[in-house]
Amino acid sequence: MYKRRHKVECRIGLLKQARGVATRYDKLAVRYESTVQLTLIRQAL
């Protein structure tokens, strides 16, 4: 269980390196979700 939690916390830490995700400029949930998805895609590439 700890290993899974650690993976999630590491991924969240990587997401927070992106400025748009960390500061949450987007007010709409749809836009924020798309920002998170784009950040994940960029990190995967």
Image (cartoon, rainbow, N blue to C red):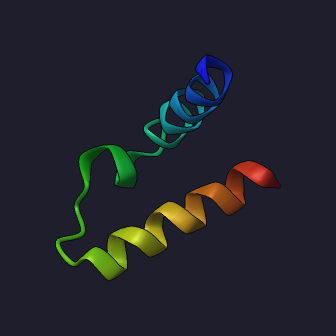
Q: Position of residue 29 (x, y in %)?
A: 27, 75
The residue shown at (33%, 43%) is 22
Extreme residue in the left direction: 27
Q: As displayed, is residue 6 above or below residue 40? A: above
Q: Quadrant of the C terminus?
A: bottom right
Quarter of the image containing the N terminus? Answer: top right
Rendered position, 8 above or below 39: above
Asked where in the image residue 28 lies, by quadrant, the reply is: bottom left
Q: Relative to residue 38, is residue 21 drawn left or right? A: left
Left or right? Give the position of 23 relative to 15.
left
The outermost residue toward the front is 1
- Residue for point 25% across, 55% down: 24
In the displayed structure, does residue 28 sit left or right of residue 21?
Answer: left
Compared with 35, 40 (above or below) is above
Residue 7 pos. (x, y %): 64, 30
Residue at x 47% of width, y 45% of height: 18
Task: Tell me which residue sits at (17%, 72%) in the image.
Answer: 27
Q: Position of residue 3 (x, y in %)?
A: 67, 21
Query: Which residue is most to the right?
Result: 45
The residue lying toward the viewer, choosing from 1 and 32, is 1
Q: In the depicted view, which residue is nearer to us: 39 or 12?
A: 12
Q: How many marks?
A: 0
Q: Nearer the viewer, residue 16 or 12?
A: 12
